[in-house]
């Protein structure tokens, strides 16, 4: 007699060893980013190439600072999970694990650096 | 007849054994670029991944520019100067094109996920819409900013 259900035996057997959580998190972050990225492009595009005083002035306002912070944090989260998907397609075993670990550390580091810069500019 | 079949089976077993011995079974990895004929849905799907992953370079540059602005005027002028030099302009324009392409392709992905637009004529039209739309949006953005 089998004590495990068919579902339990199938879980974790897919290429990524998970269910649909990954895909769902990509959908959620995609919709969120689609809403704020155009605003960010406008803010950043206007600021890029301006003089120092204008740029520090721009990011001391709440909306440019908050939108940029959101794009960095959730953009990098979306990137990290997207990279994971690519790594799963081309790498195996330890190489796959190392690539995911490296990119997670890198994207978190980049997001933290960006937030530090924004905090310093805004406050 | 039976002997021939036995020999065949023998050689198959040997083949499997050899494959197992040499660093496990070597299976092809996706997405088999060298096998398929190029077409619009394929090209646009690949471009989604390429743009999404390439945007890490743009993000890195943006964060560097922000950190430079937070550090002080001299460092900001250096970073701002590099990002607005001719090579910086090329990189940032390509980044903008990449963002808009990934944006449109992402919306298309959500539409596909809803189970819509999967027939070939629609999929091809959506692919062209992403390609042309990203160029149009890039030009519009450059005009606006």
Image: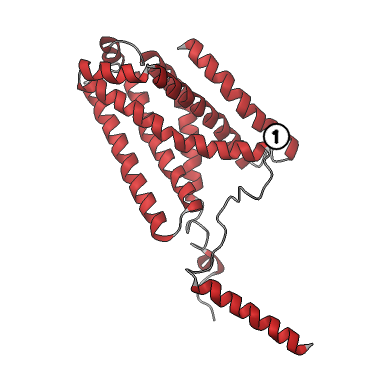
Q: Which image quadrant for residue A42? A: top left
Q: Is residue A47 left or right of residue A33?
A: left
Image position, residue A10 (x, y; %):
54, 65
Q: Is residue A13 left or right of residue A77?
A: right
Image height check: is A53 above or below B88? above
Q: Nearer the viewer, residue B60 or A66?
A: B60
Image position, residue B9 (x, y; %):
67, 82
Residue B8 in sight here: yes
The residue positioned 67% from the left and 36% from the top of the image is: B40
The subunit letter for the residue under badge 1 reads B
The residue positioned 40% from the left and 29% from the top of the image is: B58
Its colouring scheme is secondary structure
Looking at the image, which residue sits at the far bottom?
A: B3
Image position, residue B85 (x, y; %):
37, 17
The residue positioned 52% from the left and 32% from the top of the image is: B102
Q: Is residue B40 left or right of residue A71?
A: right
Q: Nearer the viewer, residue B63 or B12?
A: B12
In which quadrant of the rendered image does the N terminus of chain A lie? bottom right
Q: Which image quadrant for residue B145? A: top left
In which quadrant of the rendered image does the C terminus of chain A lie? top left
Image position, residue B55 (x, y; %):
44, 33
Q: How many marks?
A: 1
Read off the residue under disc 1.
B124
Tag 1: Cα neighbours inside 10 Å, few (<14), some, or many (≥20)?
Answer: some
The residue positioned 43% from the left and 24% from the top of the image is: B91
Residue A69 in sight here: no
Image height check: is A10 above or below A116? below
Q: Secondary structure at mark 1?
A: helix
């Amino acid at each position: 007699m089998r004590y495990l259900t068919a579902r339990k035996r199938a879980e974790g057997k897919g290429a990524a060893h998970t269910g649909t959580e990954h895909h769902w998190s990509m959908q959620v972050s995609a919709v969120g980013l689609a809403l704020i990225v155009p605003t960010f492009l406008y803010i950043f595009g206007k600021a890029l190439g301006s003089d120092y005083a204008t740029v520090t002035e721009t990011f001391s306002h709440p909306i440019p600072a908050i939108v940029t912070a959101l794009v960095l944090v959730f953009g990098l989260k979306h990137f990290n999970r997207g990279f994971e998907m690519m790594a799963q397609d081309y790498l195996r075993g330890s190489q796959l694990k190392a690539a995911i670990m490296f990119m997670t550390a890198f994207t978190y580091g980049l997001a933290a650096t960006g937030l530090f810069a924004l905090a310093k500019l805004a406050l | 007849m039976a002997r021939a079949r036995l020999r065949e089976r023998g050689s198959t077993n040997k083949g499997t054994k050899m494959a197992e011995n040499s660093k496990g079974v070597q299976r092809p990895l996706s997405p088999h670029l060298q096998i398929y004929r190029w077409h619009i849905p394929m090209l646009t799907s690949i471009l989604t991944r390429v743009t999404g992953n390439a945007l890490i370079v743009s993000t890195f540059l943006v964060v560097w520019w922000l950190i430079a602005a937070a550090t002080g005027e001299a460092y900001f002028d250096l970073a701002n100067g590099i990002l607005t030099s001719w090579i910086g302009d090329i990189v940032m324009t390509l980044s903008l094109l990449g963002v808009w392409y990934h944006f449109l392709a992402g919306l298309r992905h959500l539409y596909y996920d809803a189970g819509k637009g999967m027939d070939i004529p629609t999929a091809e039209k959506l692919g062209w819409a992403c390609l042309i739309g990203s160029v149009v949006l890039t030009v519009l953005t450059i005009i606006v900013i």
